[in-house]
Amino acid sequence: MPYFVYKISPPSLLTHIGTEDRYQNARAWVRRLRREQPSEAVFQYRMAFANSQAEAEKLLSKPRDERVIGED
């Protein structure tokens, strides 16, 4: 399954930037994009591991659950 790289702009506007087959390449690409973006930018870069571009967009559109650390 490929890794899909997206630029996410408010209000949840997804722009497909590209696709990578290897996790290391996708991770490095997203990290480089994040490092190069202006500090006042209101968008973010994310990647999704999915079977298709439609599935990746569905995963990225769904709100993420809050992470609770240290709760038993």
Image: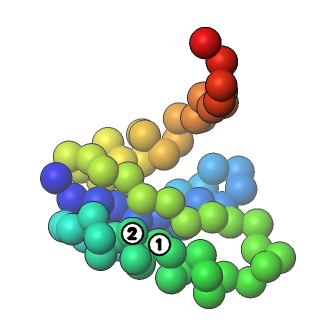
Gap in Å between the C-alphas at discs 2 and 1?
A: 5 Å
Whether 66 is drawn above or below 51: the answer is above
Q: Find numbered disc 1 in the image and state the secondary structure of the residue it sits on.
A: helix
Quadrant the C terminus occupies: top right
- The image's mark for residue 30 is 1
11, 71: nearer the viewer: 71
Q: Does the image show residue 70?
A: yes
Q: Find numbered disc 2 in the image and state the secondary structure of the residue it sits on.
A: helix
Residue 63 in the image, given as x and y percentages of width and height: 59, 34
**Residue type at the position of mark 2:** Arg
Residue at the spot 41% in from the left edge and 78% down from the top edge: 29
Residue at the spot 79% in from the left edge and 79% down from the top edge: 39
**Residue type at the position of mark 1:** Val
Residue 71 in the image, given as x and y percentages of width and height: 66, 18
Quadrant of residue 69 within the rendered picture: top right
Q: In the rendered view, does 72 fall on the left or right side of 49?
A: right
Residue identifier under label 2: 27
Quadrant of residue 7 within the rendered picture: bottom right
9, 41: nearer the viewer: 41
